[in-house]
Amino acid sequence: MKIQLNIFLVGFLLCLTGLLGAQEISNKRSVNDTLAYLKKFEINKDKYIGKPFSLLLKNMVQIQPKKAKSTFNADVNNSISSTIFTFSNKDINSDKEITLLVKWKTDEIPSTPIEFFEQEHNYRYTPSEKNFFEKKVVKDIMVYKQQ
């Protein structure tokens, strides 16, 4: 009876280890899949440059941003130069995060609302942020994995 219990425990632990390893592989695959998916938009960025951000969002059918953080300038004519978008619920500044960097064309849209939203929502990409950004015009797109 004791031998059977030991065999059962060893078998159970091996199965558990296998499941955990499979989960880790699945997580790595989803990261690589996300990076590959977003890289397609960077490769085809000519479709989006000079167009409203809403077009890019509309074409991102498999994944949508979860967090957004903008770079603010003192220049009122170009108050938001760029925004990084991330696709997980991790902290916006966490390492190894897949990031979509969008540089914006100069516009007259005041940045005060988005500064408030980012602080209020802890950089979560809520409908308020979506409504703000979808009107902005894309100047450039870059996709990378933070180190």
Image (spheres, rainbow, N blue to C red):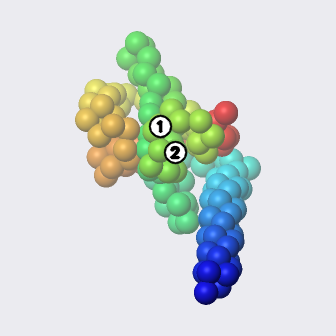
Instruction: Report the amino acid beneath label 2.
Output: Thr
Label 2, secondary structure: give it: strand
Q: Closest to the observer: 71 or 33?
A: 33
Q: Closest to the observer: 100 or 13?
A: 13
Q: Badge 2 local density, few (<14 within 10 Å), some, or many (20+)?
A: many
Residue 29: quarter of image: bottom right
Residue 50 appearing in the image: no
Label 1, secondary structure: give it: loop
Counting from the top left corner in percent of width and height, residue 49 is at 61, 43
Marks 2 and 1, the one that precedes in the sequence: 2
The quadrant the N terminus occupies is bottom right
At horizontal 66% and vertical 66% (from top left) the residue drawn is: 17
Q: Closest to the observer: 70 or 80?
A: 70
The image shows residue 88, relative to residue 145, as above or below, that is below
Counting from the top left corner in percent of width and height, residue 118 is at 33, 34
The quadrant the C terminus occupies is top right
At horizontal 52% and vertical 45% (from top left) the residue drawn is: 86
At horizontal 53% and vertical 60% (from top left) the residue drawn is: 63
Residue 110: quarter of image: top left
Work out which residue is located at the far front of the displayed protein and give it: 1
Counting from the top left corner in percent of width and height, residue 18 is at 68, 70
Residue 11 appearing in the image: yes
User: Looking at the rendered structure, which numbered label has been put on residue 86?
Assistant: 2
Instruction: Report the amino acid beneath label 1.
Output: Ile
User: Looking at the rendered structure, which numbered label has been put on residue 92?
Assistant: 1
Whole-number angstrom distance, CA of label 2 to CA of label 1: 7 Å
User: Looking at the rendered structure, which numbered label has been put on residue 77?
Assistant: none
Marks 2/1 in contact by CB < 8 Å: the verdict is yes
